[in-house]
Amino acid sequence: MVADCLSPLPRHLAIIMDGNGRWAQGRGMGRLVGHNAGAESVREIVEACRELGIAALTLYAFSEENWLRPRAEVRALMALLKRFLQKERALMLKQGIRLNAIGELTRLPNGTLEVLKKVMEDTREGSAMTLTLALSYGGRQEIVRAARMLAAKTLSGIIEPANITEELMASHMYTAGLPEPDLLIRTSGELRISNFLLWQSAYTEFYFTPTPWPAFRKPELMEALRDFAARERRFGKTGEQVEKVSN
């Protein structure tokens, strides 16, 4: 049972996993060592969220801008992703975790994309938690994509421009069907969201930590969740209104 100090928990937790390369370089090691260590953090955080009962976890694994990194590093990251998915498939099935992915997935190497699709298909019945990997993802690009889809529907007469609502827009985002993130964590001391879930984060709580992602494990997660639980989320209302509803 979750301790009272962690209540309420976020239904949807999003994480910008930052600092792998700097963590490794600070120890005199190559950046790939940091990425491998970061994969261990992914495993521990996924298991902790599943144990706590968090319904949705979204990880910013590879941004649209990350394609600009050195080719050797990009190839290594794609190979690491492929190995990670192959290794964690059994655990996801055992724990009822449904794998999801958002972004321009067609840009992924064929071998990595095939494994990703297979694990997504194999875990589609998982109902305990949805694990979403943001891959080749950009928030602005996602909004443009949704706008283009709606524009095409208006031109074809399927919908009227006046009937475009926030709800309709949200239904055309990659994250359709998921709750909006309640909490977004960014590691490694950077104080920005770097084009991640821009539409979805209108009322998201932010938590920034100097801890680099390879060092971010269950104790650091619990600290972030305690901080979140202590906040008052008003959504434009007054504190008195929120207290009245909660009582």
Image (tube, rainbow, N blue to C red):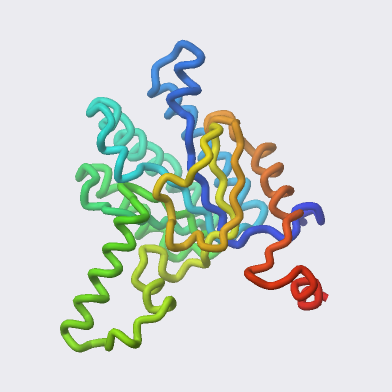
Q: Position of residue 116 (x, y in %)?
A: 32, 50
Residue at 33% in and 50% down? 137
Residue 216 vs residue 86: left or right? right
Please name the residue shown 50% across and 56% down the image.
Answer: 97
Q: Is residue 105 above or below residue 149?
A: above
Determine the residue positioned at 36% across, 42% down.
62
Residue 134 position, x and y percent, is 39, 50
Q: Quadrant of residue 139?
A: bottom left
Return the x and y of residue 4 as percentages of the image width and height.
Answer: 81, 56
For this orientation, the residue located farthest to the top is 28
**In the rendered image, the vertical position of residue 55 relative to residue 177, given as above or below:** above
Q: x, y (%) of residue 51? A: 65, 51
> In what quadrant of the picture does the C terminus appear?
bottom right
Q: Residue furthest left?
A: 156
Q: Residue at x 45, y 43 (%)?
A: 88
In the rendered image, which quarter contains the N terminus?
A: bottom right
Q: Is residue 10 left or right of residue 77?
A: right
The foreground one among 29 and 88 is: 29
Q: How many marks?
A: 0
Please state which of residues 213 and 203 is positioned toward the viewer in this rendering: 203
Q: Is residue 1 left or right of residue 201?
A: right
